Image (cartoon, rainbow, N blue to C red):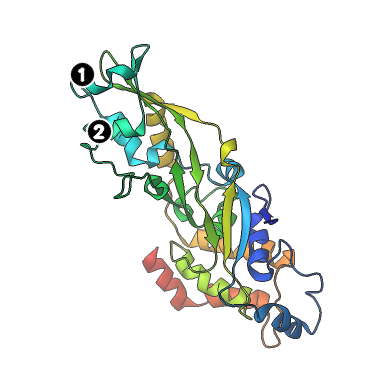
Amino acid sequence: MDFLLNLKGDYRIEILSYYLWGESTPPSNLARKDNYVLINKDYQVRDKKASIIIQASAFDYMKYVDRYTNATNFGVFQKFFDSVFSEKELEEFKGKIENETYILELDDIVKTKMYGGENPFVSKNGNYVEDYRVVAVIYYYLDTNSSDYVKRTFTFGSTSIAFNKDVKFHIDAKIYDPVCIPNLKLYPLDDNFDFQSKDGLAEFINPRLEKKLYPLKIGRTVNIKFIDKEKIEPITISKKYFQELKWRSWLLKSTQGLYELWRCFMYYRTHILPSGVLYLQDDNTNSQTNLEHTIFYNNKSLNKLQKNL
């Protein structure tokens, strides 16, 4: 697998090129007059069930894309810091006391009153399941004023972030209060790109973009496999820092409106169109302005948007 998505650049253009053409950049002869013939021959006839597989750095993803997900998004950590334990409850873990601190693992913490002995992170056969340690992140509602809002939501929309199984839980051995969560790593699970999402603005934007971005139906789902998870450094979350993170997360949550919709379509005009990634030859309409009229000058569409936002 040689394809690697560059999350430091304009990955929105790159992912769209993978989706349409199967490569990080469009074909060099895309501007030819007879491209309908070329595209039909080389791209439209591809197996409709075919998909593209590319790689992306999990380390870069958590640094440049998902700057928002943290320990407060996971119920297990919220439960931990909300708990007050007892000596009797922790009696079976006396052998795990170091420097007057209980050092517990995920296997241990689920045996406390937090979960009453029921382990929500394992399957019926007792094996830990990564998908049970995830939280769904929907970017449409996060930091809508940020400079990368449009490309972030267009490319990833919503995704899943997991925490590592070998995270630790420290409890004060004298007063039985939670102290911190050491050795915590958050990382993305494998994802995909297409126009099927119905989250947030995608429900209104995707059908219109889909119609204009690839009228010849040459797009194929792009499966994103994350690598470099080992490069993500473990962190320690104290009780005080956890409360600070809760406040920061609350500040970044946003509502959606027509302004975000406008930004998405302006990005289409100022970034996607000039990039050369699209084939927009259209003998009947001006493709660049037709998309604007489709959404911005259609009062029925605007009224529907306002009712649903």
Q: Residue at x 37, y 11 (%)?
A: 99
For residue 12, which quarter of the picture?
bottom right
Write the residue at 70% across / 71% down: 278
Residue that protrudes farthest toward the front in the picture = 125
Q: Amino acid at mark 1?
A: Glu
Q: Amino acid at mark 2?
A: Lys
Please determine whether, in this image, residue 172 is positioned above or below residue 282. Answer: above
Query: Where does the image place residue 279, in percent across and percent down from the top left?
Result: 71, 75
Label disc, if present, on residue 233 of the rendered structure: none
Please tell me which residue lies in front, 124 or 299. 124
**Residue 87 disc label:** 1
Specify the quadrant that holds the C terminus: bottom left
Which comes before the other along the chain, label 2 or label 1? 1
Furthest toward the bottom, the residue is 284
Q: Position of residue 49 (x, y in %)?
A: 56, 74
Task: Say if residue 172 shows up in the picture.
Answer: no
Quadrant assignment, res 151: bottom right
Looking at the rendered structure, which numbered label has been put on residue 111? Answer: 2
Residue most extreme to the left? 88
Q: Nearer the viewer, mark 2 or mark 1?
A: 2
* Quarter containing the N terminus: bottom right
- Would you say the residues marked 2 and 1 are in contact, meaning their CB atoms lie under 8 Å apart? no
The percent position of residue 70, horizontal first and vertical second, equals 44, 38
Q: Viewed as shown, does residue 3 lie left or right of 121?
A: right
Looking at the picture, tell me which residue is in the foreground, 68 or 177.
Answer: 177
From the viewer's perspective, tell me whether residue 91 is left or right of residue 277: left
Dot 2: few (<14), some (14–19), or many (≥20) neighbours within 10 Å? Answer: some
Separation of disc 2 and disc 1 at Cα?
A: 14 Å
Q: Is residue 286 above or below residue 150?
A: below
| Helix, strand or loop for disc 2 | loop
Residue 195 appears left or right of 4: left
* Label 1, residues with CA under 10 Å away: few <14, some 14-19, many ≥20: few
